Structures are given as C-alpha cells and as structure tokens.
Image: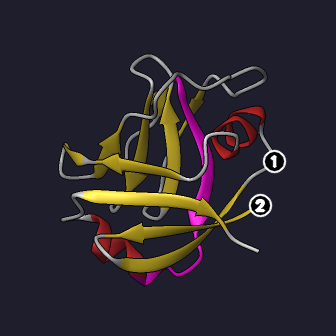
Amino acid sequence: MNIRLTIDGHAVDATLNDSTTARDLVSLLPLTLDVEDFHQTERIGYPPRKLDTTGAPDASHPKAGDLAYYAPWGNLALFHRDGEHSPNLVILGRLSDPSDTDRLATAERIRIEARS
C-alpha cells in the first residue's frame, strides 16, 4: 500500500508491506501523531490503540527510512538513522526517497494517510 506522510507540512511518500500489522495501521488512517525523539535514531508516536502483530517476526534490524511498530509500547517509529537489532519491532514499510529521512530528525507532527 502506498501512503503519504506529511512531516511538519512537507509531503513524503512511503510504501507499506503486506503484513497484518501494516494492514491494521491502514485501518486507522488518516492518522496524525505528535512525535518525539528516541535515542537520536527515530521519532516515535502513539496511535490510538495497539496494532495486531499476528505473524510478525520476533525481531527486526531497522534502517534509516523504515516505518516500524514497537509492540511492547504500542508506538510507531520512523527511523532517520539505522537502528539496532530489536526484539518485538515490526517493520511496516519504507520511505520512497531515502533523502527524506533528514526531515524526520526534527519532526514534531506527522500525518499518515493513504495515497492512490
């Protein structure tokens, strides 16, 4: 599924994978999240409910540009730097243009919506 993220007013395209968790995120769209820094690697925000992680891998190794879901806390994570191997982290998709990761580093609000 193609989505559009609006990061502090700037449109950025991304593509979600076909996982149960990504499809559950789509059911919440459009979604606006206030985000904050986590370890100077990712911006995190909390959707209104936890997402379904049925069939998700036990762990992931996120890269800059990944959109992910951290199951224990119930937060979305947008990586602007490569992250460490993380149990319970589900990769949902990626930004279409890797250069857009620079915008994530200082983002305060992100809107996620479906795109045709």
Residue type at mark 1 is Asp
* Helix, strand or loop under label 1: loop
Quadrant for the C terminus in the image: bottom right
Report which quarter residue 72 is drawn in: top left
> Where residue 35 sits: x, y (%)?
27, 48
The answer to whether residue 37 is left or right of residue 73 is left
Quadrant for the N terminus in the image: bottom right
The answer to whether residue 86 is left or right of residue 103 is right
Q: Residue furthest top?
A: 72
Q: Residues within 10 Å of mark 2 (few under 14, many from 20)?
A: some
The scheme the figure's colours follow is: secondary structure
The residue closer to the viewer here, 62 or 8, is 8
Residue type at mark 2 is Met
Q: Earlier in the sequence, mark 1 or mark 2?
A: 2
Tell me if residue 97 comes above or below residue 76 in the rendering. below
| Residue segment shown in magenta | 88-99
Q: Residue 1 shows which numbered tag?
A: 2
> Where residue 90 sits: x, y (%)?
59, 35
Determine the residue positioned at 69% across, 42% down: 22
Q: Does the CB distance between marks 1 and 2 fall below 8 Å? A: yes
Determine the residue positioned at 37% across, 72% down: 101
Residue receiving disc 1: 18
* Helix, strand or loop under label 2: loop
Q: How much space separates mark 1 and mark 2, taking CA atoms?
A: 8 Å
The residue closer to the viewer here, 6 or 14, is 6
> Where residue 75 sits: x, y (%)?
41, 32
> Where residue 60 sits: x, y (%)?
56, 37
Q: Is residue 93 magenta?
A: yes
Report which quarter residue 79 is drawn in: bottom left
Q: Is residue 42 magenta?
A: no
